[in-house]
Structure formats: C-alpha cells, structure tokens
Amino acid sequence: MAIDIQENRNEGVDLRERGRDADGRTIFCDGRLFMQLLVFTGFEQHPKILIRTLNRSKLYGALYSSLHDPRGVGLLTVSENPEFFVTELQDYLRSTPFHGLKCRTELTFIGRTYAIGYETDLNETLFERPKRYVCNPEWPWAMWYPLRRAGAFEHLNAEERRTILMEHGGIGQAYGRSDHAHDIRLACHGLDQNDNDFVVGLLSKDLHPLSAIVERMRKTQQTSRYLSSIGPFFVGHVLWQQSVS
C-alpha cells in the first residue's frame, strides 16, 4: 500500500505492492498476506480439546487464552487467499468444538499486509516476517486492536506525514531492537465492520512491555492528534501455534 499509488488514465490503477531495491529502482509484488482474529466466549472445557482439533487441521496461526474473559479464546488465522476465511475456515469452525462457542463479533479483526514503498525485500515484509512473528514461541503474549486515522492527517503535506510516521515507527523499532515488543501492521480499509483503517498486533515475551509501548505511543503526534479512534483491545496468551510451511 504505497503512499503514492500510481493511477494511469490509459492503463488503470496499479495495485501491486511496491518497494525499492539497493539501487533505488522500484520493485513490485502482486501479493499479500491476510490475517483474521476471531474471539469466542463460552468455552467451559480444557483448552487441550481445541488444541487437538487444531493440530489435526491445516490451519496456520495462533490460539490465545483471553486475558479479559476466563471462558474466552482468540483464534488468529493466516492465508494468502482471502477465500480461505469464508470457505475452509468456516467449514472447520462448524465441524469442531468451536461450533458451540459464541463469537464476539466486536472483536473480529481482519487485515492485509502492505508495503509503504521503501522496503528492499517485499517477500520478507509482506509474507515471511508477519508469519514468523505470529508463530514465534518466544513471544507468547499478544495484543490486537484496530485504529482509525482522523481525516486531518490526509490533508498534511507529504513531509509532515513522513515526520509523524517516523516518530511513531522509531518507537516501535526501539522496542523491537530491545526485544520488548514486536509489531504486525495490517491495513483494513473497507474490511472492518467499524470502518477502521488499520489492525495492529503487538507481540512480546511479557505482558508489561505491551502496555508500556501503548502508553508511550499515546504521546506521539499521530496518536494524540491524528487518530479518531483506537480499540477495542484483545489481549491473550498463546495456547497453540502452527507455522505456515
């Protein structure tokens, strides 16, 4: 999702993700990864029942125990094909113990990976890193939430937007370098039932860093001035992970 999407009156719109190679030349990738979080409540049995069915499945992603609901779980699934979520995933949910649980639709998030335009390795950005992050057993704590930018942000000039995003991104990179928290950013324009723009996933070995980075981000220009909404939040601890082969 490069900032300056190319539109050509003769050829139409180019929706490929874009980056730049080491020589500054534009590179393209016509693909992306989709992730969906479904949160359920009403689970009265031991989690191993769900884990057994997931181990027998062909699903990839993570199952979380909810921090806020003792009977709640969150299922994050990953696919390059969006049809997966309305075919294979739904068939799986209807034929397993998930069928008897209540889906908390207010905590259903779905989004797609994207490139900003400067990345030198689009495969790493769009596919490998997000999959690796979700399934890293060393980062069992997860926080997922949507956000919506205020319209005023889009009226800033390119340099102002870049400065604001660099402040925000720099904090995330600092937490990542310290192995305190690692982020997954998904675009969800038109996909979110509450008209949000992005879904953010924060992953960590401990719970405190996730709270700390959200607290720190509140002080940035983007959060304090240019977000119209943030949340609701799902916070969970990993029960199961399965990597994409």
Image: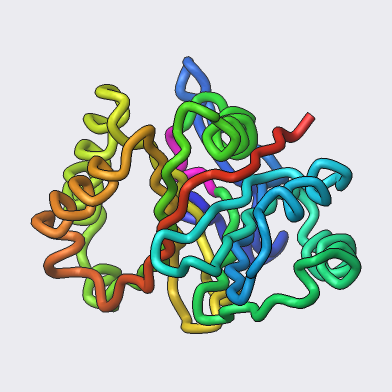
Q: How far from the left and from the top, in percent, is residue 152?
A: 22, 75
Give residue 102's quadrant in the image. Answer: bottom right
**Residue 122 visible within the image:** no
In the image, taking residue 227 as reference, residue 28 lies left or right, namely right
State the image coordinates of residue 56 (x, y, percent, origin top left).
88, 44
Q: Is residue 67 left or right of residue 111?
A: left
**The C terminus appears in which quarter of the rendering?**
top right
Query: Which is more toward the observer, 1 or 195?
Result: 195
Residue drawn at (62%, 36%), measured in percent from left and top? 131
Q: Residue drawn at (22%, 30%), measured in percent from left and top?
A: 174
Residue at 48% x, 16% y: name it. 22
Asked whether residue 134 is drawn in magenta, I would say no
Using the rendered image of the protein, determine whether residue 23 is visible from the camera's viewpoint: yes
Which residue is pictured at 73% across the width and 47% down the height? 51
The stretch in magenta equals 114-118
Where on the picture, by quarter, is residue 112? Answer: bottom right
Q: Position of residue 136 (x, y in %)?
A: 54, 30
Principal SS element in the magenta part?
loop
Q: Front-most of 58 and 5?
A: 58
Give the total number of marks visible in the rendering: 0
Question: Where is residue 83 drawn, in percent x and y?
Answer: 83, 63
Q: Is residue 200 left or right of residue 5?
A: left
